[in-house]
């Protein structure tokens, strides 16, 4: 990634000089001071709607999506108003999942049939960060149980350095959804105060890899690489006292109308569903040994 404003095509850098200074500072501190905070839906993956095995309730949630999603991506609705709309959407959706009798078996079936795809280069990024022992905190306004199932089915492996912060389900003894744990996380309120909801992905796989939870204590790592596809994703690092942060945004919708607000918010903006390979290159630069 060079320091011009829009090079290579599809990439925009807000302040090249400032970015280079932070890259130098992060590289000098080394990988032991770096952490990655990444949004899941629309950043690491394409968006997909869970099918709960009940056509009536799938249709009801689809109707909610068709009503609220345009409001979510609208560049003209004030954040305060949009936050209330997102709270409404999530509350209604969670209610339908419970009322419609969602089961864990239905989740596994839905994931197996879903067309959810990871952005090109995501696995390479995860493998590089695991090799460097850089912790990754994955945030989602979706459902942690589904994310963990997506990792299990779509990637077929675990990563010892990844933790998930998302809405967690409570199932009864029959495997049916009965409630959600803790405060609802939606697209505009994701932040590190939700760390108590996080869980290492590999724990779900029960891999005996001698994992040490101290290695992912986020607050000991004062340099942050943040990845998101929504301006609200910048809140994922709220509550964290960091020295340097580089925020990378993926602008997937309303490109012309939203470009300015994204470039005002993020240090680097990738346009039109770009791959994650630019981020892989950036991590390689940030973690290169000092010459």
Image (cartoon, helix red, strand yellow):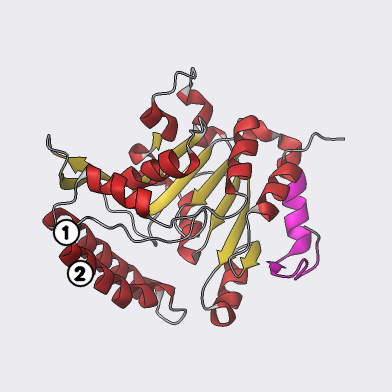
Q: Is residue 250 left or right of residue 85?
A: right
Residue identifier under label 1: 95
Q: Is residue 246 left or right of residue 142?
A: right
Q: Residue at x 32, y 43 (%)?
A: 145
Q: Nearer the viewer, residue 225 or 150?
A: 150
Q: Residue at x 38, y 55 (%)?
A: 114
Q: Nearer the viewer, residue 178 or 84?
A: 178
Q: Nearer the viewer, residue 143 or 238?
A: 143
Q: In the rendered image, which quarter is residue 27 located in?
A: top right
The local secondary structure at tag 2 comes to helix
Report the disc number at residue 60. 2
Q: Position of residue 54 (x, y in %)?
A: 18, 59
- 108 up-or-down from 81: above or below: above
Q: Nearer the viewer, residue 242 or 250?
A: 250
- Quadrant into which the C terminus falls: top right
Residue 163 located within the stretch drawn in magenta:
no
Q: Position of residue 75 (x, y in %)?
A: 47, 79
Residue 13 located within the stretch drawn in magenta:
yes
Q: Is residue 227 visible?
A: yes
Q: Is residue 80 left or right of residue 233?
A: left
Q: Residue furthest front?
A: 113
């Amino acid at each position: 990634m060079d320091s011009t404003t829009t090079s290579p095509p599809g990439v925009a850098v807000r302040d090249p000089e400032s970015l280079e200074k932070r890259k130098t500072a992060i590289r000098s501190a080394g990988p032991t001071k770096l952490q990655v905070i990444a949004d899941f839906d629309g950043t690491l993956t394409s968006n997909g709607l869970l099918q709960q095995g009940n056509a009536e309730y799938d249709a009801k949630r689809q109707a909610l999506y068709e009503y609220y999603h345009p409001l979510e991506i609208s560049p003209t609705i004030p954040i305060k108003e949009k936050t209330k709309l997102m709270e409404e959407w999530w509350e209604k959706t969670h209610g339908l999942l419970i009322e419609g009798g969602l089961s864990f078996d239905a989740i596994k079936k839905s994931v197996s049939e879903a067309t959810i795809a990871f952005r090109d280069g995501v696995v390479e990024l995860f493998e590089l960060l695991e090799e460097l022992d850089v912790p990754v905190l994955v945030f989602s306004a979706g459902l942690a149980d589904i994310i963990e199932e997506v990792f299990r089915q779509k990637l077929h492996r675990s990563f010892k350095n990844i933790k998930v912060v998302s809405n967690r389900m409570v199932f009864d003894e029959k495997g049916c959804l009965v409630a959600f744990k803790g405060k609802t996380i939606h697209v505009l309120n994701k932040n590190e105060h939700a760390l108590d909801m996080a869980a290492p992905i590999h724990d779900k796989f029960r891999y005996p890899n001698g994992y040490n939870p101290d290695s992912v204590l986020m607050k000991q790592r004062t340099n942050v690489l943040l990845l998101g596809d929504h301006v609200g994703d910048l809140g994922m690092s709220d509550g964290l006292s960091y020295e340097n942060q580089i925020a990378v945004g993926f602008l997937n919708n309303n490109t012309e109308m939203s470009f300015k607000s994204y470039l005002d918010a993020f240090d680097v903006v990738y346009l039109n569903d770009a791959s994650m390979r630019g981020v892989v290159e950036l991590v390689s630069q940030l973690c290169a040994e000092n010459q």
